[in-house]
Amino acid sequence: SFINPNQISSILYDKIILGCSHNGVREIIAIQYGLPVEKIFYCDEVLKKNTLRRKGNKKRHSERLTVVIPTYNREQRLKRTLDILEIQSDVNFDIIILDNCSNYDVAQVLDKRKDEFKGRVKIVYNKTNIGMALNLANAFIQKMDGWVWMLTDDDIPSVYAVEDIYEEIEHCHRIGVIHFSICEWDRYMDHGYKDFKSLHELMEFYQNSTIDWQNIHSYSGDFIYFSNKVYNMKYVQAYYEKIFFYAYSSVPQLVPLLFMLNEESSGVRISNKKIVIYDTAAGDHWDWIKTMSGMRIISDFPLDLDIGERKTLYRVIMGTDMDILIKSINKSDMEFDIRQIEKIYDEIYQYSLNEEERHAYQSKIRELKETI
């Protein structure tokens, strides 16, 4: 039968097949309509029987996974995230919610949940709001051992995310960070993943991959994305000082990844497994001018890269979308914003853009100045 989700409870069925392949839909439908997620399949999972796998892993793992969730004033989205974590196929994990002084009692998101689930959740309260970047950096020191999945409060985890993470962990040796890409890299990987021992290897991977640099925003979003990275705390602890020192970069999550590769102290794996779906921010908390102004601080990182590799790093981290910055300008503070855009150009874009792009960027800055 072809039906709407709200009609499912009135019929008998063996499978619910979604007429789409967009990740995250399965989870949203399951929690919105109270449906058994293990009976929900994407149409391509049914057509490609080799991908049709029902999970339910109950085995114990050699190292424990902890999900750390920084949150601030996103009650409904945090509730949605916890709803999906509560129905994970593998329940062998703990949760730490890091509240950045929200305007409501975060503990209420645990109301009416099963005791077993609540017993695995810990809430840490900041006495005052310390800002987004510091709260992200603070997430690293909440757990000193095992593996930590950093998951923001507004993204949509796969219901099989924890099981996929453990599956990857069990086959990782001397890996400090697993980057679960939201892009498709299968054609560049032999086994669905690729390991890197140095920052040179990672930059070579991005340089040699047939990336359409005109759509670099997709790849930069993947690289700086917070929720698609899982950290081996055994290796990350050595970089706590750097994480906090460079927290003003707005991307503290990249600090251990970049420095451990630069020093070759441990490796980084890019996996093509999809553990989380980015959900567009609801317009709260984000200030692109401030965020990009912070990200330009990557030029301060003492990384052993040549000019070509640094250019690749800048483009992969920051992209080249001038329109986003222009739309973010606050008319009441326009002079300040334009100065920040100039700094972004001076420290990052003049090195990573081609001549045509640099000319367009400079022209736009001149036009903005004339409006002040």
Image (cartoon, grey):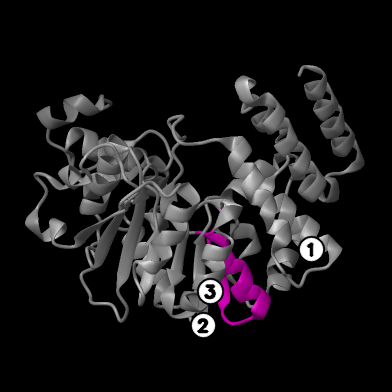
* In the displayed structure image, the side of residue 98 where residue 245 appears, left or right: right
Residue 126: percent from the left, percent from the top? 32, 53
- Disc 2 marks which amino acid? Arg
The answer to which of marks 3 and 2 sits earlier in the sequence is 2
* Residue that label 3 marks: 239
Residue 323: give its label. none
Depth-wise, is mark 3 or mark 1 nearer the camera? 3
The answer to which of marks 1 and 2 sits earlier in the sequence is 2
Residue 104 vs residue 16, the one in the foreground = 104
As measured in the structure, the alpha-carbon distance from the residue carrying label 1 to the one carrying label 2 is 24 Å
User: In the structure shown, which secondary structural element does the residue marked by tag 3 occupy?
Assistant: helix
How crowded pointer 1 is (Cα within 10 Å; few <14, some 14-19, many 20+) is rated as some
State the quadrant of the C terminus: top right
- The answer to whether the residues at label 1 and label 2 have Cβ atoms under 8 Å apart is no
Taking the view exactly as shown, the residue that stands out farthest to the top is 371
State the quadrant of the N terminus: top left
Residue 332: percent from the left, percent from the top? 61, 21
Residue 352 vs residue 162, the one in the foreground = 352
Depth-wise, is mark 3 or mark 2 nearer the camera? 3
- The answer to whether the residues at label 3 and label 2 have Cβ atoms under 8 Å apart is no
The answer to which of marks 3 and 1 sits earlier in the sequence is 3
User: In the structure shown, which secondary structural element does the residue marked by tag 1 occupy?
Assistant: helix
Indicate the quadrant where residue 30 lies: top left
Q: Which residues are magenta?
A: 251-272
Residue 174: give its label. 2
- Disc 3 marks which amino acid? Tyr
* In the image, residue 212 lies in the stretch drawn in magenta: no
* Residue that label 1 marks: 309
Q: Residue at x 8, y 56 (%)?
A: 115
Q: Residue at x 67, y 74 (%)?
A: 262
As measured in the structure, the alpha-carbon distance from the residue carrying label 3 to the one carrying label 1 is 22 Å
- Disc 1 marks which amino acid? Glu
